[in-house]
Amino acid sequence: MIKVGEFIRTVRKRRRLTTTQLAEKLELSNGYISLIERDIVSPSLATLRNIANVLQVPLESFFLNMEEEVVYSHLKQEEQEVLTNKGKNWRMLIDKNRTNIMGAYFADVPEQDEDIYSHEGVKLIYVLEGESAISIAKEDYTLKAGDSLYFDASLLHWDQKDNDSPRKVLVVTVPAEDFHF
């Protein structure tokens, strides 16, 4: 069973608030906050919404079961899958077998990538090293180290023809991108 009071106490302490300070911000009594935190009384939804606002947490966080697994993917470097195709290396940062909600990978591209990509969702590209010249539909973008680009991944996207400099990029996709070699 979800212990809302225990969760509220944990977040309150993390925010360095006393029960008195929380009660004052909520215009409730200190005793009532104490009863909530000890799971003796259940606050109304309106009170929970106010507590969530004061503690700066999403309302739905009160209803998550903390006993269930909360980490979808934790991979040490040696556990990360590396895909290689045509001299390009993709180091998968999220275990796709555990979740398909989001994909993230590190791409080490030594020269121009001649493939054209299109897949559902959105994509974020962040250039770590080098320069990446990318075309998305009819637009061209030149990204240097530190630059990012976020776009609709269903649009055709590819490397520009003069993109022969080696580069390293971090890519995040929602949902996870499928690789077909």
Image: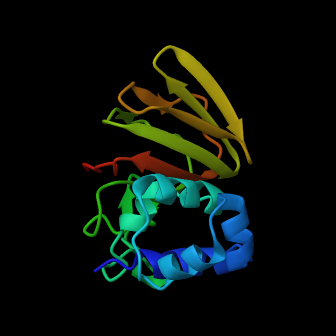
Which residue is at 67% across, 30% downward? Answer: 142
Nearer to me, 51 or 10: 51
- Locate residue 134: give its quadrant: top right
Above or below, 38 relative to 45: below
In the rendered image, residue 136, in percent from the top left (x then y), is placed at 49, 24
- The quarter holding residue 85 reads bottom left
| Left or right: where 174 falls relative to 108 | left
Instruction: Give the answer, above or below, for where 138 lies relative to 143.
Output: above
- Find residue 72 and report its horizontal and vertical position in percent: 36, 71
**Which scheme is used to colour this image of the protein?**
rainbow
- Quarter of the rendering containing residue 34: bottom right
In the visual, does 57 lie left or right of 41? right
Q: Is residue 97 above or below residue 56?
A: below
Task: Using the image as rendered, state which of residue 41 and residue 7 is in the foreground.
Answer: 41
At a point 67% along the width and 68% down the height, the residue shown is 23
Q: Tell me what residue is drawn at x 42 percent, y 74 percent.
A: 4
The percent position of residue 131, horizontal first and vertical second, equals 69, 42
Where's the N terminus, which quadrant?
bottom left
- The reply to whether residue 36 is visible in this rendering is yes
Q: Residue at x 48, y 82 (%)?
A: 6
66 relative to 38 in the view: left or right: left
Q: Which percent across, then down, holds residue 90?
A: 44, 59
Looking at the rendered structure, the number of numbered marks drawn on it comes to 0
State whether residue 87 appears in this view: no
